[in-house]
Amino acid sequence: MLRILMILSIFEISLRKMITKEQIKNTGATFTPAMLADFLSSKISFYVNNGKQRVLDPACGEGELLLSIGQKLSKLKTDFELVGYDSNSHYLKLANERMISFGLKNINLVQNDFLQSIDLSKEQLLFNFTPSVQSSINNSFDIVIANPPYVRTQILGTEQAQDLARKFNLKGRVDLYHPFLIAMTESLKEGGILGVITSNRYLSTKGGESIRKFLSENYEILELIDLGDTKLFDAAVLPAIFLGRKRKPKNPSPANFIKVYEELNGYNGNLIPVESIYDVLNSKQSGYFTAKGKRYKKSSGPLKYKIGSGACWEMLSNNESDWVSKIDSAAKNRVQDFFKVKVGIKSTADKVFISDKWEELKADKPEDELLKDLISQENVEPWNATDNFKLKVLYPHISIDGKKNTVDIEKYPKAKKYFLQHEEKLKSREYLIEAGRHWFELWVPHRPDHWQYPKLVFPDISLIPRFYFDYGGKIVNGNCYWIVATKNEDVEKLLLIQGVANSKLMTKYHDLVFNNKLYSGRRRYFTQYVERYPLPDFISLQAKEIISTVKELNKSTNKEQISKLEIKLEILVAKAFGVEPVFNLD
């Protein structure tokens, strides 16, 4: 037995070396760590009914999940069959040898594409699943345990993506785990258990609405576990675990959530020492943990959701939920009541259009009239205390009578010469040509007349909120978002938003409500999040005081004064929402 395991170990290492980063990106082949597989199979086995269990892994890879659930069911003295699908024969060979070496029997591994094997009728595409289908895998499994590939359908290639879109009625930018969720649901018997590891993107994004709606309509949700930035995979995946029982619930059943993220916000309270992240997950306690030099924050509580709704599911403890409710109740408006949040310019050829070395071109430098100051994520600060803008964008657009136009390039011979040097690259943007546009345009230039107005600018990704107020008519890069005030009476509304958005209170609100951190504590500031930021009554005394303080912050260059003003701002923002000030994020 030992010799067999040694041979398998060598074979497994060799197989893993065959998998390049590009293959992982293109196929989503992210192997499940053994301890995570054991954690998931333990969760599933808790809900297993008596009787024979037919188990499916629709993308089994090297068989880690099947091996783990097989061992758990063996300990329960339960009769079972293990069925695994994968299109890679090498993975299947390893999976089979591993399970046999551990004494597992009744194994059926199929070299095939599970998504092509499942049958779907028109009714099923409307998520009305019925047993009247031909495939032997439809409605035939008691347990589905899975870690389906993490890959956008666009990466699969046009033909395969179109085939999936037709079969599963998919639209727009979707992840491959979406059709897998549909297919896995069809493969389950009524009352069967689904335990699946996916990206956590669907939990908090607008693009995840259809998945949240689908899961709530077809499952009694048992548990939801957001594993966040815990780095349990080699690939850059932020995973989540969904556990559900297939049925059409009339009312939401009690379900619990667990949420674990690496803690990087300077928490200085008591830490619970554990050996690993899995001890954090298995602990009945919530709070702050330390394992092998890393700190984790774990929260848990009742999962709140509405059947058939695409709205985000609430994963807040009772105290957190009460605090968010106070903020929401005190809010008079949301950002979206006053403004639209826009993403910056998109050139789709940044190396041509954007540079901080235009002067090095000397006599060949395009005309200064077309070179505009560019705000980019690397030079945005919360307050107007620095003005270090070196990037410029070659911007071939003008406004005529309030409408966007492209410049007459013949009037700018240096710019024309520069563009011609990059003609091949620019003309390769066929989508721009097909749209009837000039080959030297920006893909998304926005309205040129809007850059002159006061605006708030903030990075898409940032450790801290960096809402910067621009009076200087700068253009905004595509790695930032912006809010523009085209009317004088709206300028102070921008200042109110800047004060609230840059506060620690709103950072705490952002983390709790939108729950979308990346690795190392970095936050996403999507349009759909910032537009939902709550605001106090604009005409209230507290709002006026916030605006006054923000004006001082935007003028100050003294770090000590800025620090004092930020403390004052926290007190004012908290007072406006009727809660205690947030001086430390915990």
Image (tube, helix red, strand yellow):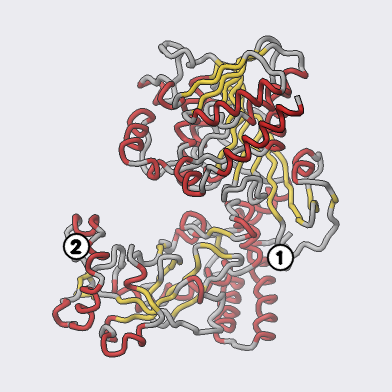
Q: Residues within 10 Å of mark 1 (few under 14, many from 20)?
A: some
Pair 2/1: label in front: 2
User: In the rendered view, does 87 fall on the left or right side of 373?
Assistant: right
The answer to which of marks 2 and 1 sits earlier in the sequence is: 2
* Residue 179, quarter of picture: top left
Q: Nearer the viewer, residue 584 or 364?
A: 364
Dot 1 lies on which element?
Answer: loop
**Residue at label 1?**
582
Q: Which disc is residue 466 wearing?
A: none
Measure the C-alpha gap from mark 2 to mark 1: 50 Å
Residue ID at (70%, 61%): 264
> x, y percentage for residue 332?
54, 59
Mark 2: secondary structure: loop
Residue 519 horizontal side relative to residue 294, left or right = left
Q: Type of residue at label 2?
A: Arg
Classify the position of the C terminus by image quarter. Answer: bottom right
Residue 511 vs residue 295, the one in the foreground: 295
Q: Is residue 316 visible?
A: yes
Question: Answer yes or no: do the residues labelled 2 and 1 have beta carbons within 8 Å?
Answer: no
Residue found at x 19% / y 59%: 433
Expressed as whole percent of the image width and height from the top left, the position of residue 31 reads 59, 38
Residue that appears at 36% across and 68% down: 350
The disc placed on residue 437 is 2
Count of residue discs: 2
